[in-house]
Amino acid sequence: MLERIRRILMNQKDITGYKICETRTQSNELFFIRKNVDMDRAKTVHYFKVTVYVDFEEDGQRFTGSSATSLHPTMSDEELEKAIREAAFAARFVKNPAYPLEEAGAQYRVLPQSTFAKESLPYWMNEITKAVYKNDRYDKGGINSCEIFLERIDTRVVNSRGVDVRDTKYKCMVEFITTWKEEGEEIELYRCLEFSDFNGSQIESEVERMITICQDRAVAAKTPALEHLPVILTREAVREFFGYYYSKSNALSVYNHSSSWKLGDRIQGTAVKGDKITLTLDPFLKNSCYSGGFDSDGHALAPVTLLDQGELKGYAADIRYAHYLKVPSTGAITNVVVKGGSKSAGELKKEPHLMVAAFSDFSVDTLTGDFCGEIRLAWYFDGEKTTPVTGGSVSGNINELHHEIYLSRELWRDNNFEGPELVKLMKAAIAGVTE
Amino acid sequence: MQVSGSDFLARSKPLVRKLIGLLSTDYGQVSVLGTDTRGKTYMVSGTGIEINDYFLVERGFVVRIHNGVNYSEYSFNELSEEKLPGIVAEIKEKLHKTAPEITVNAYDKFEEEEITKQFFSEAEQDPEALSPEVILRSLTRVRDMAAALSDQIVNFRTSFNYIHVSKIYLSDKKDLEQSYLTCEARLFCIAGRDQVIKSAYRAFSGMKGCEVIRELECHYKDVVEDCIRLLDSKPAKPGMYDVICAPDITGLIAHEAFGHGVEMDMFVKGRAKGAEYMGKQVASPITTMHDGAAAITHMSSYLFDDEGTLGTDTVIIKDGILRNGISDLLSAQKLGTAPTGNGKRQSFERKAYTRMTNTFFEEGEDSYEDMLASIRFGYQLEGLYSGMEDPKNWGIQCIAMLGREIVDGKFTGNLISPVVMTGYVPDLLKSISMVGGGLDLEGAGFCGKGHKEFVKTANGGPYIKAKVRLG
């Protein structure tokens, strides 16, 4: 199929370049209600995404137009030709400043093979199931429902400049709901794990942790009105929080004027009271579904530092936007690593605070820095005792408070993020349920 | 014009029938959903132009079999006479193979009615018949007019997407075919002043054609004006407020509060409090809420869902009383209810779940003027950003683009943003004290189940007055 597509592309006189991304995915999926399989699924799908490029000149200015189209394996030669012809025609009207395609010859790092490669997908589905349910052993609560997806994805990227690179990745997703019931009504919490390598004990402990914090939500009081109290973000919310820095230091955001960050900027200000942020992108992060030696352009990836002690050192830039901003191309890397801070988790929790274990959905506006989330479970420490609370919300703006944030020394890793387990915000707003 | 069907799916029918025949020798019940979705996305901004296939584009099949105990599914996208034996072999090898120690829920075979039916939607202007140049010219014109309105505009973007969905559903008793076209257009403005940056948007959508682009011309000035004024906005002081919800926020409340809350696959899992409240009052007596592919013509209207069940119009809340839930085929069987045609998939590759279609509050009898005049201090909330459901514990989180301050029944011109609305669903719905006339739905966004399985839905209603907590 790829050769059929390439032959048709070579015969298109209007285009000046092309890129073909081929993916072949096999998966097994299990859907549980409590401990019982409610449905099982499998899939084998094969995709070709073709981008055609047309270089042209108008009024002395050079442009690279492009258009991407999905080609299906069930397409006839006539259908393939029509789709490619239409994409080539459309690309002529896409007047974007000229940029180059990835050139052949790069050295690609090959990542160690996943454990999942050693046995069949159905074998691992059973192993994952055992790990998920090992700690589901309580009377008052446990796993309400769970979905397990395990995929093997073979990818190949080919372009008209001679790039031809391929790899095989594994991606596992375990989405589960835990519930707990005490005297009041039953409550639930949500968790989604994603990983590329099997680690049974990690799955077991994460399920146990969710069941444990579910118990706290079951006895939680309503969040009181709490003014001027530090807020401590944990885990998933921490990842979302640093997503703002990742987005703002992306060359695409800068080029589109969604970010005004300039190299050398001290993005937390010049009078930082708390910890300064150091953020790197690591395409080889262990157990991330997004790790790999190349991106969708076929660019060879390597670790890169974007923020060093609060100073913007580089942009995350694919080949197009790197060319536009005249900065080095990092390729598209989505693994984010944030260095831990100066204080331990214990020190961060010493003074009165509200530590949020779970939000309904912690949302960060990557344009403005506004963030908010409804509290599903938090622990309110008043200086003497800790009370689990629920309801109300936390909100604020990152730009207005990041001159004084504290990052825990302890790190947490979850799929494509490694960073502090806790982030303490000194000036977030808390809307309580009880006034 | 009438939207055309898929030649590919028409060509594939004999092979699909043959596959069903081959599988039927081993499995009690076999059905196949085939999809062929085309679509493009066009975007013009101050810094670039894009024309690409829309990400929902797909062509493939999903087979559902009754394996003797329950149902299993296999998704694939390579089909030919030569590949048929391989597909059958894969299904036998891969499905219903869990370890013996893992227990399995049982489902009976569905009783299907014999039915052959087709549906082809109507549209004024076919986007596939227009040159990309013509579409880009329209988008560029509006963008340029908008960008010229203020030097505080950092970037302005116009975009247009079309999705031409074609599906077939075949089983031994059913032969269904449908093809429909939905389109959406957006205005998106970013404005900046000093260190402050804000955005505003408006979206237009429906089961219609390129004519949706015309709506951009009528509203780009409003979007620019809102965006510039948002630069001076402040967050709301946390507390309870009287608010008027614009139709998109009314729709967001309908969707998050009692749309997700009555998805009956959540009843089966014991994850929805709504199951205990059937026949009870959950909202103000002046509220009536619907969901259904056949309830209204909009982004999620269709003849049949992704399990071959015909779409319906479900009255979820009638005069404040919770009356009905919505369901997919398997949930309905488990609960002993009639399926409502709400079994939807993100794509042929994914499982069908109970999903919303077009969800909205019915219009009421209050005038907008009376609603506004009744507020001593509050806000009018506009612009859907996001929402999160909690069917089990009835928490709600909605984020709106802005709130317009109202003092003594008049707008002051001040705006609040961001607007975060949280609360307890029945408190919020029982607080609805006025329901306006008119009905407006919007479906340019996506709805997820938890944090995945994104499908198209439309949500809306009239202007309503309620009391909510803003934070």
Image (cartoon, grey):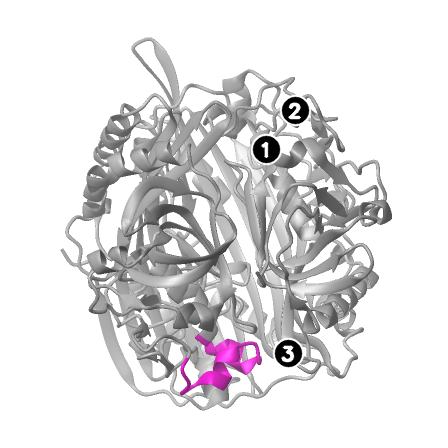
The magenta segment: B262-281
Assess whether mark 1 and mark 3 are in contact (beta carbons under 8 angstroms): no
Label 1: which secondary element: helix
Q: Residue at x 36, y 40 (%)?
A: B414
Q: Residue at x 68, y 21 (%)?
A: A270
Question: Is B415 placed left or right of A174 in the picture?
Answer: left
Does the magenta segment cover residue A205? no
Chain under numbered label 3: A
Label 2: which secondary element: loop
Give neighbour class at mark 2: few <14, some 14-19, many 20+ (Cα, 10 Å). Answer: some
Amino acid at circle 2: Gly
The label shown at residue A269 is 2
Do the dots labelled 2 and 1 sit on one chain?
yes
Percent position (x, y) of residue B135?
24, 36
User: Which of disc 2 and disc 3 is earlier in sequence?
Assistant: 3
The label shown at residue B454 is none
